[in-house]
Amino acid sequence: MENILFTLFLTISIATILNIILKKFGISHIIGYILTGTLISYGFNFNGVNNDSLELIAEFGIVFLMFTIGLEMSVDKIKKMKEILLLNGFLQVSISAILIYLVAFYIFHLSVEVSLIVSLAFSLSSTAIVLTYLKQSKDIHTPYGEKSTAILIFQDLAVIPILLLITFLTNDTLSISEVLTKTFISAFIIIVFMFTIGKNLISWLLKFASNSRIEELFLGAVLSIVIGTSLLAHELGFTYSLGAFIAGMIISDTNFSVKVESDIASYKDLLLGAFFFSVGTKIDALYFLYNVHIILLIFIAVMVIKALVVYVIIRRKSDKSTAVKSALALCQVGEFSFAIFALASSNNIISNETANFLILVSVLSMILTPFIVNNIYKLASYVVVEFYESDKITPIKAKNHVVICGFSILGRVIARDLSERNIPFVIISDDLRHVLLGRKLGYMAYFGHLDKLPVLESLKVDEASSVIITVSDTHIKRLICEAVLNFHKEANILLKIESIDEKAQLKDLNIKKFVHAHIEVGRLLVEEALSVRGENK
């Protein structure tokens, strides 16, 4: 027990410190967990923790990952995206897999089974890294973001038959055609079962737990559903992951989907870290050093193949800019390759040495991915002129104007009022949907971040009469205010705040006017109530 607790202490401490450091360099936390596993493996040898325990942790990590992805998908969502999701996704996975299979089979002379597994695993991209970036940067609303997201969703769906395929490949009595047929039939049977009887049971349990009004019981019900459906799928001859994924997908179509996602949000990254930690323990650093040239060669070849495939697919019905950025966003090998290689290795379809080699290729790809996506506009600009590139704004010709930062409901109210008063203004937002709406309404709206110097210069903030900041996040407010004041220390900043505590956190800044949202609304309501009262006298 003491050895296990000490190992947990070392793991959590090292992972936390590494991720804090890596975060400063824009590197995904996934890499931090992988490196932690490698460091623990080499430096402490787990202090007595056996491999069975690690495999159990890894299995639960995969199960939880599939459940969270299932939560993000619903039948309605798939219907809305069916054209770009099903067609582009199918073309990307199938063409990439075919090309990689040909290379693996004819050039590297791998067996049919191993070549098939390698091609399918390498055809998948990193949902965890790419979608996280797209959501944070708001690029998920751009044309390339929408198409990349659709392909990633299809890839997530494709993981299920791939994992099933590996399970059936362990049966030596079946041919490849029989395996594919049985995989399809078996998947169809369990999906029908889960979406009929299983759906009713899950809905009843969530409703029963919700009515108890005890949070831990509701969370316990959710975990029971995940683990229970995983065990059921495994008993029927499928993978644990299939049951968890379908459970998530069923819950996504209920009234409890938002609550479930909210309740597990704080645990998601840590629990997923368990899987990536176990992956790190499988990395052979010495093997990497001795074979770095071969690993790099295959890594580059895979990324080039995938980038070309994605570019051609997207370019059919989109502009060159969208195709280039989509190709850059999806050219890496994703985290699901770890699950595929781990399952294939545990079932002796591929050797441990081959699995370690393939995992190293995947890890190297994922290490590079954050640098690619964080600089995707800059990289794409070498090939094509960018239209949606944030922070690239042609200097405006304005003076004594108002700069509105943010164009949600409050920003729109302000813009409409200024427009009616014929006061010149300009809108800056990091949400492309808001920018497109502002332009549709005839306003001067730009896509970018007001804490960037080029944006401040282009919008002539130093010549503006006022800067109205309507964003809600306190940290973002501070970044914007500091940038504006550093650029023009006498800037007339009008800042919306949500509480007195928030005002206290920002009081060190030279802000001209704080507008307390609730106080102002309350004052207006009182004035309205008094006016009605006066009329009734």
Image: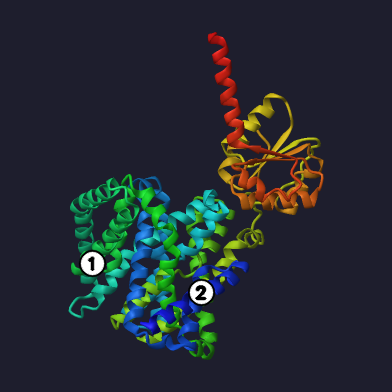
Question: Residue sitting at 45 percent across and 85 percent down?
Answer: 41
Q: Quadrant of the N terminus?
A: bottom left
Q: Which amino acid, by three-letter code, is at mark 2?
A: Ala
Is mark 1 in CB contact (under 8 Å) with mark 2? no
Q: Quadrant of the C terminus?
A: top right
The image quadrant of residue 232 is bottom left
> Element at badge 1?
helix
Identify which residue, 396 or 197, lies in the foreground. 197
Question: Residue sitting at 24 percent across and 48 percent down?
Answer: 208
* Residue 90 shows up from this direction: no
Kindly report which numbered mark, 1 or 2, lies closer to the viewer in this rendering: 2
Q: Residue furthest front?
A: 537
Query: In the rendered view, does 176 fall on the left or right side of 79?
Result: left
Question: Taking 435 as reference, is 93 above or below it?
Answer: below
Identify which residue, 6 or 487, lies in the foreground. 6
- The CA span between labels 1 and 2 is 30 Å
Question: Taking 427 as reference, is 348 above or below it?
Answer: below
Q: Residues within 10 Å of mark 2 (few under 14, many from 20)?
A: many
Q: Residue 15 — which label?
A: 2
Image x and y of residue 133, in percent: 54, 59
Residue located beneath label 1 in the image:
231
Question: Taking 235 as reference, is 173 above or below it?
Answer: below
- Specify which label sits upstream in the sequence, 1 or 2: 2
Image x and y of residue 15, in percent: 51, 74
